[in-house]
Image (tube, grey):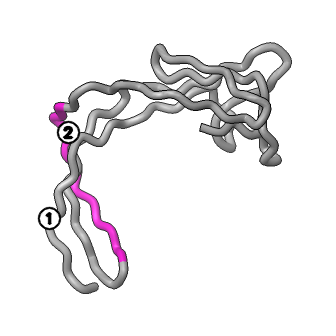
Amino acid sequence: MTLQDSTGHPVEGAKAKLRVDQDISDGSGHISGSVDLGSCHSDITFRHTEYSLGYKNIWDTDLIYGVWRLEIPNTGNLDLGIGGNNVEYVVLGHLCDQKLVSSNPS
């Protein structure tokens, strides 16, 4: 992850939190680490269409949604957040499995 301000400059000293794991960005705005999300068992499947290289591809995707949050808390004099609306957190989904249902020339 790289933390940048709205002009694209790195933000040093900002905190990022994915669930319970936390790191602090360095002078170049970088944060790195790993999280073990464990095995994935989903009751939610959605079908979506993708157009790529002249083909219409239909996929079924199993996912877990809303179990993890990425947080960039506002600390000290740093006015931080995620995205254009500068929100404090976003909810993430975990893609468990994807199956190609069909692929046909479009």
Residue occupying image coordinates x 19% and y 45%: 45
Q: Position of residue 58 (x, y in %)?
A: 22, 66
Q: Identify the residue at image location x=50%, y=17%.
A: 21
Q: Residue at x 17, y 31 (%)?
A: 41
Residue 46 included in the magenta stretch of the image: yes
Classify 48 as above or below 31: below
The C terminus is located in which quarter?
bottom left
The single residue placed furthest to the right in the displayed view is 77
Quadrant where the N terminus lies?
top right
Give the SS element for disc 2: strand
Give x and y (percent) for residue 3: 69, 36
Label 1 sits on residue: 101
Q: Which of the numbered marks, if any, corresponds to residue 8?
A: none
Q: Amino acid at mark 1?
A: Val
Q: Quadrant of residue 52?
A: bottom left
Rendering coords of residue 66 (x, y %) = 37, 29
Considering the whole magenta stretch, tell me its main secondary structure: strand
Asked whether residue 56 is drawn in magenta, I would say: no
Rendered residue at 81%/14% (across/down)? 76
Give the tally of numbered discs: 2
Figure quadrant of residue 26: top right
The residue beneath circle 2 is 44
Relative depth, front residue between 45 and 14: 14
Above or below 97: residue 104: below
Magenta stretch bounds:
41-52
Q: State which quadrant residue 88 falls in.
A: top right
User: Looking at numbered disc 2 in the image, what kind of residue is underneath it?
Assistant: Ile
**Residue 59: percent from left, percent from top:** 22, 60
29 up-or-down from 6: above or below: above
